[in-house]
Amino acid sequence: MPAAARRPATVPPPSAPPVARRAPAPAPQAAPAAGPTLFLIFNNQRIPVDKDQFIIGRGSKTSDLAIKDGNISRKHAAIIRRNGTYYIKDLGSTNGIDYKGMRIDNKRIDEGDVFHLCDYELRFTYR
């Protein structure tokens, strides 16, 4: 048989090296709340602050703690949780937040802190 008429032998392609399979990644779990739970004591009620942004204001639909008083702004203040630490922040209210007789814009909340919004006392504890 002439060389041109010969068909080359079919050589199977080399088998691919085995692929290393990884175990499936574990399903993501909800991260536990960092740090202890903060409680707001208002009118002898102990209210857990269990969100990243807890709004205090006059509006019952827009606030997590509604204070029905015309001197309280619709959105007066927010308790903000950032990296497990809580802060209180004035949201541009007319009458502000008082802490130890001084008007503040924002402050980290420490155990036993007491703030005033007009005539209302907000006491905070981690216990």
Image: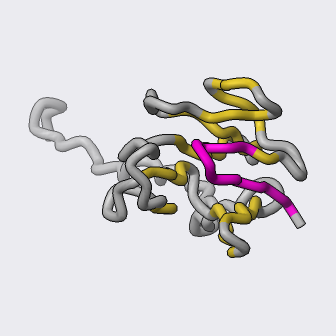
- Residue 25 versus residue 80 in the image, above or below: below
- Residue 75 versus residue 100 in the image, above or below: below
Q: Measuring from the top left, give residue 59's x and y in whole percent.
A: 35, 56
Q: Main secondary structure of the magenta part?
A: strand
Q: Is residue 8 left or right of residue 29?
A: left
Magenta residues, start to end: 115-126
Quadrant position of the N terminus in the picture: top left
Q: Is residue 95 left or right of residue 97?
A: left
Q: Residue at x 47, y 53 (%)?
A: 15
The residue at the far bottom in this view is 45
Q: Residue at x 17, y 41 (%)?
A: 6
Q: Measuring from the top left, give residue 13's x and y in whole percent.
A: 38, 48
- Tell me how many marks there are: 0
Q: Residue at x 45, y 32 (%)?
A: 93
Quadrant position of the C terminus in the picture: bottom right
Q: Is residue 77 left or right of residue 42?
A: left
Q: Measuring from the top left, give residue 82's x and y in whole percent.
A: 66, 40
Q: Measuring from the top left, give residue 72's x and y in whole percent.
A: 45, 46
Is residue 70 one of those drawn in magenta?
no
